[in-house]
Image (cartoon, rainbow, N blue to C red):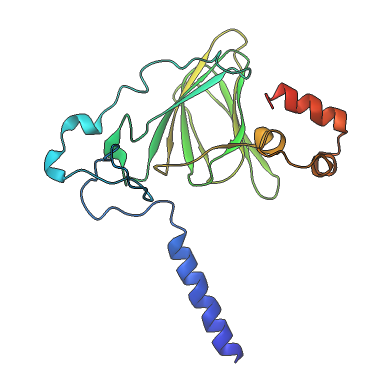
Amino acid sequence: KCVVLFLQLCLGLTLLSGLAKPDPDPLQDYCIADTKSPLYLNGAPYLNPTLAHSSHFTTSALAKAGDTKANQFGFSVTLTTLANLPGINTMGLTMARVDIAADDLVLPHSHPRASEVTICLQGVILVGFVDTSNRLFTQKLEPGDSFVFPRGLNHFLYNMEPEKPALAISGLSSQNPGAQIASRAAFVSNPPILEVVLEKAFQISRQDITKIRKNLGG
């Protein structure tokens, strides 16, 4: 009986590992996203390959600087999406332009479905991530330097320049990487997490929670 249970466990882990791939592999050269389709799929419906043309594989979405004044934290992230780059459908990747105002940062956040590589193009950016043993890995990036953030781990980007903006380009290993900002997930969820939970988790008072929620726009 123990042998049977062991084999069932091994089979279950094998099946789960197969289901845990970030994105499915394409079965054809490309699948141009049909963004007008009413169907809901894990991915997107795609055009007849005979209708594909070069414009489906190019975008200028990352050419324009983002508005770093649009939030109180001083950063802007512009993503390639199926809407502006339909040729990425099923390719298992996304690109992002990251603009950071002087002395500001991209808040600690994670991507549940993607690893990320970031290349500094302008400025001096301090980057880092924390692993599951709470070990911090951090590095100062100058133009041309790169850094990798493992999938699902909290990471940040801080512009160390006191007067100049910073710019980075990132590549992520998923068509839909997702992003969860740690502080907003804890304090401005909908509906809100019970205050007693936050009090115990962060060892803070109800007054602190109210202030943090207000500062985060909750």
When the figure is inspected, residue 34 is found, relative to residue 215, above or below; the finding is below
> Residue 80's x, y, as percent?
37, 31
Residue ranking furthest to the bottom: 1
- Horizontal arrangement in the rendering, residue 87 relative to residue 204 (left or right): left
**Number of marks in the rendered image:** 0
Residue 15 lies, in percent from the top left, at 46, 69
| Quadrant hosting residue 135 | top right
- Where is the N terminus found, in terms of image quarters? bottom right
Q: Identify which residue is drawn at 47% across, 41% down.
A: 177
Query: Residue at position x 32%, y 43% from top?
Result: 38
Residue 151, horizontal then vertical, whole percent: 53, 46
Observer-nearest of 168 and 107: 107
Residue extending furthest toward the left = 50
**Picture quadrant where residue 212 is located:** top right
Q: Is 169 above or below relative to 15?
A: above
Q: Looking at the image, which is closer to me, 82 or 13?
A: 82
* Residue at the top extreme of this rendering: 163
